[in-house]
Amino acid sequence: MNTTAPAGSVSIYAEASPNPESMKFVVNTQLLSEGVSVDYPSAEEASNSPLAQELFKFDYVGRVFIAANFVTVTKTSEHGWTQLIPELRTFLKSYVESGGPIFLVDPAAEQRAAQQAAGADHSLEDQETAQKIIDLLDNYVRPAVEQDGGNITFKSYREGVVTVNLQGSCSGCPSATVTLKSGIENLLKRMVPQVTEVVAEGVTASF
């Protein structure tokens, strides 16, 4: 995967998310491999992404999430999006068109290794269960969540409890708990009988 944005004409449009503090900027070019995403809750954690580091220089940017063809920005200021969207869209368009680097190292390999490590210390049965959960999340949950400018990733499975990470607009979203319990938990319980509960990390606001 090329970690530098391709030069050329780029089209970007803003799309609202269920989280009023997050805005999704959709780009007509590929920023990351399909199925891979990265979430940066702070500038300090964005050392691998020059693009995210530049976005954090805007004093109202509090979180940056990058997926295959969009960037979700979560703001910290009280300024309305009407004021902020033109500035962010202009910056992103200029940065991507100029071929600015998105990442220093492709995150895909790192994420695959982390996912494998998460199940390495489990029994064979638990590893098989964890893989079923990962497949369900990737095939049924991720596409819907990405539509809203976020992502959900598998972290661990232990004694019936699935732990996931909420990223991008999902982190701090007022409807995240409802989605997690009424949607994702019910799906996993129905499809994987061993699952008793789903809990989330990466939630930055109370509901």
Image: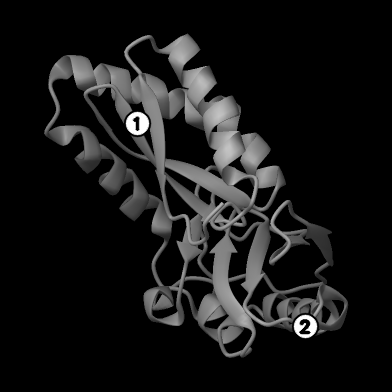
Residue type at the position of mark 1: Val
Q: Residue at image x 73%, y 62%? A: 20
Q: Residue at image x 34%, y 31%? A: 162
Label 1: which secondary element:
strand
Residue type at the position of mark 2: His
Q: Residues within 10 Å of mark 1 (few under 14, many from 20)?
A: many
Q: Residue at image x 51%, y 54%? A: 167
* Residue 79 disc label: 2
Q: How far across and how far down the image is residue 47, in percent?
A: 39, 78
Q: In this view, does 105 lie above or below 68?
A: below
Q: Is residue 200 above or below residue 173?
A: above
Q: Residue at image x 52%, y 56%? A: 206
Q: Do the residues labelled 2 and 1 touch (CB within 8 Å)?
A: no
Quadrant assignment, res 168? bottom right
* Residue 203 disc label: none
Which of the two discs, 2 and 1, labels the residue nearer the N terminus? Answer: 2
Q: In this view, does 24 lie above or below 189?
A: below
Quadrant assignment, res 59? bottom right
How many dots with numbers? 2
Q: How far across and how far down the image is residue 62, in percent?
A: 56, 76
Q: Is residue 85 above or below residue 166?
A: below
Residue on which disc 1 sits: 162
Label 2: which secondary element:
loop
Tell me the CA gap for discs 2 and 1. Answer: 37 Å
